[in-house]
Amino acid sequence: MDYHIAQPSPDKLQVLPHNQYHSSDVLTPSTTNPSPIVQFKEWFTEVVNAKVVPEPESMCVSTCTPSGIPSSRFVLFKEVDTRGFIFYTNYSSRKSQELLANPYAALAFYWREVHRSVRVVGKVEKVSREKSEEYFKGRPIGSQLGAWASRQSSVVEEGEVQSRLEEIKDRFGVKDQEGTTTDHGIIPTPEFWGGWRIVPL
Ligand SMILES: Cc1cc2nc3c(=O)[nH]c(=O)nc-3n(C[C@H](O)[C@H](O)[C@H](O)COP(=O)(O)O)c2cc1C
């Protein structure tokens, strides 16, 4: 599809022509599993195995303030079990603050290459500390350091994150993060970091 951007006036930008959305199959009750979670697992497995969607685990998470003002951002889907869908984040971030005050979220996946999108709407709960720690231990050391150094959702000064990263490396005695992937066991899970589970309504 060739995109054409029109600017009919200096204050307006339009995308032309209309991109026709094609779907290869039709969803009916007889072609879908009665359990949405089982259906999701089938679709996600298909998408991963097809190897055509660059980052199938990217999902948009929408949260709302108590007065109903929404905000959305992308995070990485990490696990689904019989109870719900899990992602990990900073508990001081805007999304976490909104979830603490108003514990409902919507997720949206879009897998363009296979003409499929999925929405999940649910109530959220924090995953257990043990589970968050288990996941954190398996992250590459660079991501572990990043979780400590990044104050999500806040404006930072030039060079601030880099200098915080150096402080954190000193604090935990990390000399060289190159080549280290998992099970280094040096860096503890931050208290302000962990998972959220979205339990479908
Ligand atoms: C593809 C992609 C994946 C991301 N995955 C995560 C994630 O798993 N957890 C996370 O906290 N932020 C992730 N981010 C960053 C978030 O989009 C967001 O910028 C950050 O969490 C702060 O969001 P907030 O201020 O709305 O809380 C990801 C960003 C992108 C583009």
Image (cartoon, rainbow, N blue to C red):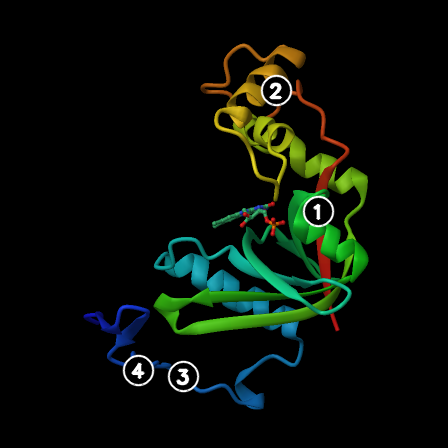
CB of residue at label 1: within 8 Å of ligand 1? no
Q: Secondary structure at mark 4?
A: loop
Dot 4 surroundings within 10 Å: few (below 14), some, or many (20 or more)?
few
Say which label, 3 or 2, has the lower sequence index: 3
Distance of mark 3 from mark 2, alpha carbons?
46 Å
Of the two numbered discs 1 and 3 on the same chain, state the one appearing first in sequence.
3
- Residue type at mark 3? Asp
Tell me: residue 69, above or below residue 140: below
In percent of the image, x 32 and y 69: which residue is there?
Answer: 11
Query: Disc 4 designates what residue?
Result: 20
Q: Is 176 situated left or right of 87 in this image?
A: left
Percent x, y for residue 46?
46, 64
Residue displayed at 72% across by 31% down: 190
Residue 98: x and y in percent read 73, 56
* Secondary element type, mark 3: loop
- Is 79 or 46 nearer to us in this picture? 79
Quarter where residue 64 is shown: bottom right
The numbered mark at residue 25 is: 3
The answer to whether mark 1 and mark 3 are in CB contact below 8 A is no
Amino acid type at mark 4: Gln
Identify the mark at residue 35; answer none if there is no mark: none
Q: Which residue is mark 1?
A: 195
Q: Point out the tag, 2 or 1, that comes first from the N-terminus.
A: 2
Q: Are marks 3 and 2 in contact (CB under 8 Å)?
A: no
| Residue 181 visible in the snapshot | no
Tell which tag, 1 or 3, sits nearer the viewer.
Answer: 1
User: Which quadrant of the structure image shows residue 121?
Assistant: bottom right
Q: Earlier in the sequence, mark 4 or mark 1?
A: 4
Residue tagged by mark 2? 184
Q: Nearer the viewer, mark 2 or mark 1?
A: 1
Hey, what amino acid is under mark 2?
His
- List x then y, in percent, for residue 137: 66, 30
